[in-house]
Image: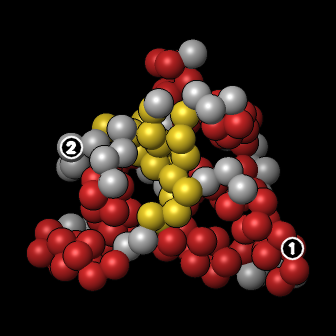
Amino acid sequence: MIRLFLDTNVVLDLLERREPWVYDVEVIFQLAVEKRVELLVSDLTFINIAYIARKSFPKDKIFDALVYLRRFVGVIGIGQEVIDRVLASRHVDFEDSAQYFAAQREGMDYIITRDRKGFEFLDIESLTPKEFLDRFL
């Protein structure tokens, strides 16, 4: 089974119904329902979503969205090892580096993101949701 690490921006596309990207993300989540892919996010993604969404949504709606999300995704912890690797890398985007090193530690096949340049220096291939679907469907 293909293991996909979802960047926070892709998850927000789904939860906030961001057009036009939401449609491709919905297909990826349907592939997970059909057990054709495994979806994982980091614990940082849940924290980031709660923080970002607090400006736009009531607290109950945020919790409902996160509970819904959790039904479909596994959660990877960041932890001390990942933080140490990020600090050693000195990559300009701390958050993307943390996401990447967590995904790398868990042996993810692809990182699905709309911000590919945040992951271009790394050895796990990053694809937009559309690129993933074009390649694998």
Query: Can residue 106 be seen?
Result: yes
Q: Residue furthest left?
A: 88
Task: Report the side of 74 relative to 12 (left or right).
Answer: left
Amino acid type assigned to the residue bearing label 1 in the image:
Lys
For the residues labelled 1 and 2, the Cα–Cα distance comes to 36 Å
Q: Nearer the viewer, residue 136 or 91?
A: 136
Q: Which mark is residue 49?
A: none
Q: Residue at left 34%, top 78%?
A: 79
Residue at 28%, 53% in the rendered image: 104
SS for tag 2? loop
Instruction: Tell me where residue 115 appears, x and y as whole percent.
Output: 44, 50
- The amino acid type found where label 2 is placed reads Asp
Measured as percent of width and height from the top left, residue 128 is found at 49, 37
Q: Which quarter shows the C terminus?
A: top right
Residue of label 2: 123
Chain-order first, disc 1 or disc 2: 1
Structural crowding at the residue carrying mark 2, measured as other residues with C-alpha within 10 Å and reported as few (<14), some (14–19) or many (≥20)? few
Residue 101: x %, y % from top left: 28, 61
The numbered dot on residue 61 is: 1
Rendering coords of residue 13 (x, y %): 68, 51
* Helix, strand or loop under label 1: helix
Q: Is 94 placed above or below 12 here? A: below
Image quadrant where residue 118 sits: bottom left
Number of numbered discs overlaid on the protein picture: 2
Q: Would residue 113 be seen by someone viewing this image from the given angle?
A: no
Q: Is 17 left or right of 45, judged from the image as shown?
A: right
- Label 1: how many residues lie within 10 Å, few (<14), some (14-19) or many (20+)? few
